[in-house]
Amino acid sequence: MAQPGLVYGTMGRIEPLLEPCILPRFLDLDQDGKIMAEYVWVGGTGSDLRCKTRVLTKEVKSVKDLPIWNYDGSSTGQAPGDDSEVFLKPCAMFRDPFRPGPNLLVMCDAYEPPRDLPDGKHVDMKPIPTNTRYACALAMEKAAKEEPWFGIEQEYTLLNSTTKWPLGWPTSGYPGPQGPYYCSAGAGAAIARDIVEAHLKCCMYAGIQISGINAEVMPSQWEFQVGPCVGIDSGDQMWMARYILQRVAELYNVEATFDPKPIPGDWNGAGGHCNYSTNGTRAANTGWDTIQKMIAKLEKRHAVHIAGYGEGNERRLTGKHETSSMDTFSWGVANRGASVRVGRSVPVEKCGYFEDRRPSSNLDPYVVTKLLVETTLLSD
């Protein structure tokens, strides 16, 4: 297992990085009453996360106290160079585990700047094309009476940032076949647990509704779960949990990839399974009937959902390695090879939730949760 401050090179050499014990000497310095707010947003690819720090001189009690900011969209693939200013609107805030104290992580979405600013006010901001949160928030508002709950299972793979090969794997080779790695313990089976544990504690400190972690089927592949979250909070919290993971992995000079099939061949891909329930599915006695009606709606819009469930998902949804085929829709009780899995207790208790297993690990949670709500609650 790689140690903090070190990285294994292509020939197995240990190469020194920045010394990790120096920064903590400065973290407790007095901030003179100021607050550091780390603004985080989704970049132009729809999967990259960007961030920058703003120092604030006033107390922040809610997200409404955070100022609208801006950035150079031409450098993130979100605006042309001759009209590059993009506005950042704070949407959710969390405690910053990397800068303990009054400091904040701020999840934002992005807008074209208003063309007129009468009386110095920000008006008529229009979401930029890559702002998927805006449409999601509108759908969640329409479905608010149903209180949609989401729990997303985020799988990811840890890579050597130099070789782009999974951590703990033989150089230019492969480990033993899958079997001993899922929910494993021990050297050679559970790889880079330090990163996973650090991420868990950081999310808990931040206020993320993280509900668990486990080692996954492919060695050096892990999973964390965020939820249950209501409505738009699911997307906000999942994006911030991903950001925190990237920051933790950065400290170890390790890459956390959300590629749905990072290693081709007889290895499991990585998914972003979405567990979903509403007031209707949770209702005693009638919830099971509601779930079956929702699944029938999902089948009719299978192609629409597949198109929005993650780039490169065709490499993962092959009908093998605990996946369904992306070409056909299927569902079943306790069936991990189906498009939608229903827990075994649901038909017995006549209510509960179901799991959409089609989203890939690089899903946009705003897109996936919006599609689920639109199909099951806002369409006939």
Image (spheres, rainbow, N blue to C red):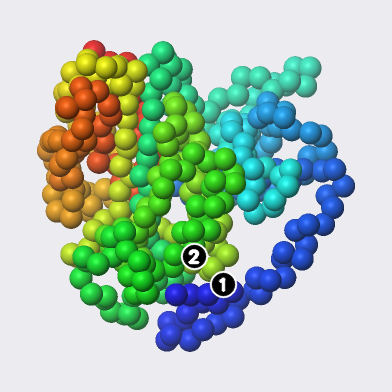
Find disc 2 in the rendering and name its residue: 194
- Residue 166 in sight in this render: no
Up the image or down, 123 lies above or below 45; here it is above
- The quarter holding residue 288 reads top left
Q: Which residue is drawn at 35% across and 59% down?
A: 215
- Residue 212 in sight in this render: yes
Q: Marks 2 and 1: CB-CB under 8 Å?
A: yes
For the image shown, how many numbered marks are present on the structure? 2
- Mark 2 burial class by Cα count in 10 Å: few <14, some 14-19, many 20+: some
Up the image or down, 102 lies above or below 299; here it is below
Distance of label 2 from label 1 (alpha carbons) = 9 Å
* Secondary-structure class at tag 2: helix
- Mark 1 burial class by Cα count in 10 Å: few <14, some 14-19, many 20+: some
Find disc 1 in the rendering and name its residue: 4
Q: Kindly identify which numbered label has been placed on residue 173.
A: none
Position of residue 262 in the picture relative to residue 115 (left or right):
left
Between 270 and 200, the one nearer to me in the picture: 200
Image quadrant occupied by the C terminus: top left
| Label 2 vs 1, first from the N-terminus | 1
Q: Which residue is drawn at 13% across and 49% down?
A: 319
